[in-house]
Image (tube, coloured by chain):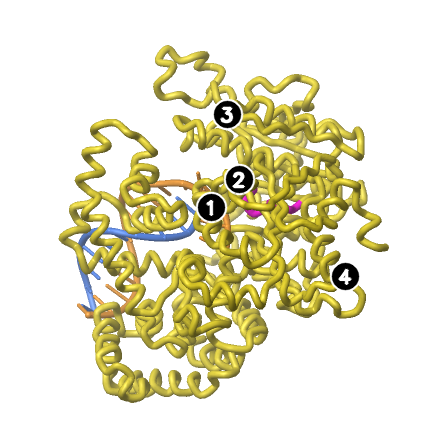
Chain colours: A yellow, B orange, C blue
DNA sequence: CCTACCCAAGTTTTT
DNA sequence: CTTGGGTAGG
């Protein structure tokens, strides 16, 4: 069937928009993704060059999905050269594609772990300054990143992140006192990044946007290669991303979609003014709205609408279901996490066996990655297949980074973090010796071959072994998969020993997958940069690569466990939202900050609107009764325990069906007598 | 100077 | 229950 026939009038109007720039304001479940897909297909069908269309999303997963679906809707291979990417990986591609323009071609992209490592190094080198601060390296990085993403100055960024936005005299005094020291450390960090040819995630955007802003030639070059820019999740763009986008107003046609009620990334500087002020900021722009919800039954939308109505912010939104009425959502009270997890497992197994639902019809959502640990343990025990979205990525696992460190130094010999990691991997080399060896290599400035230097700096057989390994890997520079093979062959013994606790169970199987992943890249630089920015999900502890990377179909039917933040754009027949308890919604972190509370409300809103037919909300009774037993605290107005702000405090009766589960003592009583245990058997003392 | 072991603390959300 | 910091022994 043709895509066009699947669109409603509003969607079609957006898809066939013929003006310059368009913002589509689309509520949850109103066919946002379908519209962006249809727009791309429409453009290509009407003669646009697919290689001059760029789709931008926030996750690689979303990008891949959109591109695949556009291609599937087009005859033959018409959409073959269509490109979809995250903001970050798109910038990375541009940096690689135009090495002279951006001048950062041989730089190494570093992930947050590496950034932290680098910041720790810097803090160590400036211990006299660092010791005066009671701010940890991670927090320094947060301030740095926040400042660059929001375009705020250092003082304001410190205020927002370290002092929760306070503006009193004491805060002022403290900020003035610590700011110079923070500045020293951040400058040192920047200097080190430059020396070692590193780009952190923010740099990717900054390098490109700075050049585009300053350089007319750059704009001209890009305008020759780009006609249409399609941006998903516009409400989550931050000032830095806006700065990146704004030169493209002149260069090409913008087609942006977003929903202010789903803006949940303000901690990363997201600014929904990019949506609200679109018309003012973008000349020749139009704004269209999509309002009909195709995803959920009306009962599910009723709860979601109710939640937004309670907000002091006016979202001007009432989702209406096209599909009509269905089951009333369920609100389940449990007394602890294990009970919750077991109930969820029961429910899924029941749906699977009795109701003809598949595992993949279930989506389980949680505020934090951490919270799903119990659930995962129960799922493993009860053999329910699952994938987790969000959280640690495949390439960020320690054992993978150990191996990749070798590839990184081959790619960029200035990469100190990788050098330290690689060298300390070997028995007998610690941090101190590693930095000494590194100093020799860096001081040589590429005059001597690195294997020779290695052999000179490391005495004995180890030196020869390490030098040979480096040499062997370097020889295969074009073939990334081969390099992984060689590295693994030499390092597997050491890896097995280092991670002996869970080597067989958890880690060993990752390396064949790493090789597959490596094989899908044509150059080492791409593998290291792009691979880092790519999502590889984990299934029952083992990595699962997206379909474009892995040809063989893995077991497809699995429950999806996701953080709410990673679940944007997902939907499922049955959706279970975990632990919607006081102190969690809103989170106890945000109790004294109205903006944070409202962001949490939107987080919950995103979660609720994922469900198609069956919505189940769980919460912990322990924390509910804690609230009620305390009544209204006498010191109201100071520290609250969340009772006043808890989102579900006054949920109207008809909106959800409540159920409370407790331990079932009966089944314990009826259980058969256990057999007697005798530990003295099997031993003859004579 | 390296490693292994013990004890303590503390857990949002993502590219 | 994992991570990190600190210490003792090699």
The chain letter under disc 4 is A
Q: Same chain for marks 4 and 2?
A: yes
Q: Is A569 a magenta residue?
A: yes
Count of all numbered marks drawn on residues in the image: 4
Residue A448 locus on image (x, y percent):
28, 88
The chain letter under disc 3 is A
- The residue that mark 3 highlights is A622
| SS for callout 3 | helix
- The residue that mark 4 highlights is A45
Could you tell me if the residues under marks 2 and 3 are in contact, i.e. CB atoms within 8 Å? Answer: no
Question: Real-space Cα distance between discs 1 and 4?
Answer: 32 Å
The disc, 4 or 2, on the residue closer to the chain's N-terminal end is 4
The disc, 3 or 4, on the residue closer to the chain's N-terminal end is 4
Could you tell me if the residues under marks 3 and 1 are in contact, i.e. CB atoms within 8 Å? Answer: no
The residues colored magenta run A564-570
Q: Which image quarter holds the N terminus of chain A? A: bottom right
- The residue that mark 1 highlights is A238
The chain letter under disc 1 is A
Q: Residue furthest left?
A: A128
Residue A542 in view of the camera? no
Q: Is A87 a magenta residue?
A: no
Lateral position of residue A322 relative to residue A410, left or right: right
Packing grade of label 3 (10 A; few <14, some 14-19, many >=20) is some
Lateral position of residue A599 relative to residue A189, left or right: right
The disc, 3 or 1, on the residue closer to the chain's N-terminal end is 1
| SS for callout 1 | loop
The disc, 1 or 4, on the residue closer to the chain's N-terminal end is 4
Could you tell me if the residues under marks 1 and 4 are in contact, i.e. CB atoms within 8 Å? Answer: no
Packing grade of label 4 (10 A; few <14, some 14-19, many >=20) is some
- The residue that mark 2 highlights is A280
């Amino acid at each position: 069937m043709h895509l066009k026939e699947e669109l409603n009038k509003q969607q079609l109007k957006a898809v066939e928009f013929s003006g310059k720039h368009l913002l589509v304001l689309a509520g949850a479940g109103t066919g946002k993704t379908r519209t962006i897909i249809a727009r791309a297909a429409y453009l290509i069908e009407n003669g646009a060059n697919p290689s001059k269309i760029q789709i931008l999303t926030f996750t690689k997963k979303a990008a891949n999905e959109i591109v695949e679906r556009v291609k599937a809707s087009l005859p033959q291979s018409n959409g073959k050269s269509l490109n979809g990417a995250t903001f970050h990986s798109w910038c990375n591609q541009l940096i690689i594609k135009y090495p002279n323009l951006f001048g950062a071609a041989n730089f190494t992209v570093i992930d947050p772990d590496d950034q932290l490592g680098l910041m720790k190094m810097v803090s160590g080198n400036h211990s006299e300054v660092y010791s005066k601060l009671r701010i940890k390296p991670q927090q320094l990085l947060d301030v740095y990143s926040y400042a660059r993403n929001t375009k705020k100055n250092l003082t304001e960024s410190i205020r927002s992140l370290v002092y929760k936005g306070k503006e009193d005299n004491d805060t002022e005094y403290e900020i003035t006192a610590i700011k110079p020291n923070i500045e020293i450390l951040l400058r040192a960090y920047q200097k080190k990044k430059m020396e070692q040819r590193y780009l952190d995630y923010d740099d990717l955007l900054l390098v490109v946007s700075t050049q585009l802003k300053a350089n007319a030639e750059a704009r001209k070059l890009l305008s020759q290669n780009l006609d249409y820019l399609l941006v998903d999740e516009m409400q989550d763009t931050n000032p830095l991303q806006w700065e990146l986008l704004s030169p493209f107003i002149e260069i090409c046609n913008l087609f942006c979609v977003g929903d202010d009620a789903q803006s949940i990334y303000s901690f990363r500087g997201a600014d929904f003014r990019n949506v609200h002020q679109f018309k003012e900021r973008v000349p020749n722009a139009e704004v269209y709205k999509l309002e009909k919800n195709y995803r959920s039954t009306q009962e599910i939308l009723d709860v979601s609408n109710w939640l937004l109505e309670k907000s002091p912010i006016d979202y001007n939104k009432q989702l209406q279901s096209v599909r009509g009425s269905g089951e009333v959502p369920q609100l389940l009270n449990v007394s602890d996490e294990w009970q919750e997890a077991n109930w969820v497992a029961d429910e899924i197994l029941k749906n699977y066996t009795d109701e003809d639902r598949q595992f993949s019809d279930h989506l389980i959502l949680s505020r934090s990655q951490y919270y799903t640990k119990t659930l995962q343990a129960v799922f493993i025990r009860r053999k329910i297949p699952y994938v987790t979205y969000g959280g640690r990525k495949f390439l960020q696992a320690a054992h993978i980074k150990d191996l990749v460190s070798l590839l990184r130094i081959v790619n960029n010999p200035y990469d100190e973090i990788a050098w330290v990691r690689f060298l300390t991997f070997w028995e007998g080399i610690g941090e101190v010796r590693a930095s000494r060896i590194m100093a020799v290599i860096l001081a040589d400035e590429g005059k001597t071959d690195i294997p020779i230097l290695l052999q000179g700096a490391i005495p004995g057989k180890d030196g020869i072994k390490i030098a040979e390994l480096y040499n062997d890997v370097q020889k295969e520079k074009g073939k990334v998969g081969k390099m992984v093979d060689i590295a693994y062959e030499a390092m597997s013994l050491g890896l097995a020993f280092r991670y002996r606790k869970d080597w067989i169970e958890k880690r060993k199987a990752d390396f064949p997958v790493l090789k597959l992943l490596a094989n899908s890249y044509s150059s080492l630089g791409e593998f290291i940069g792009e691979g880092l920015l790519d999502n590889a999900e984990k299934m029952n502890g083992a990595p699962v690569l997206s379909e474009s990377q892995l040809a063989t179909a893995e077991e497809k039917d699995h429950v999806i466990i996701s953080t709410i933040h990673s679940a944007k754009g997902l939907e499922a027949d049955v959706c279970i939202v975990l632990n919607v308890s006081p102190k969690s919604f809103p989170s106890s972190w945000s109790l004294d900050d109205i903006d944070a509370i409202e962001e949490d409300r939107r987080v919950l809103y995103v979660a609720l609107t994922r469900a198609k037919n069956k919505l189940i909300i769980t919460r912990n009774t322990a924390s509910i009764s804690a609230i009620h037993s305390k009544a209204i605290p006498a010191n109201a107005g100071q520290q609250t325990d969340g009772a006043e702000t808890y989102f579900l405090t006054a949920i109207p009766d008809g909106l959800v069906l409540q159920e409370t589960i407790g331990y079932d003592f009966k089944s314990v009583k009826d259980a058969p007598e256990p057999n007697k245990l005798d530990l003295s058997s099997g031993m003859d003392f004579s």
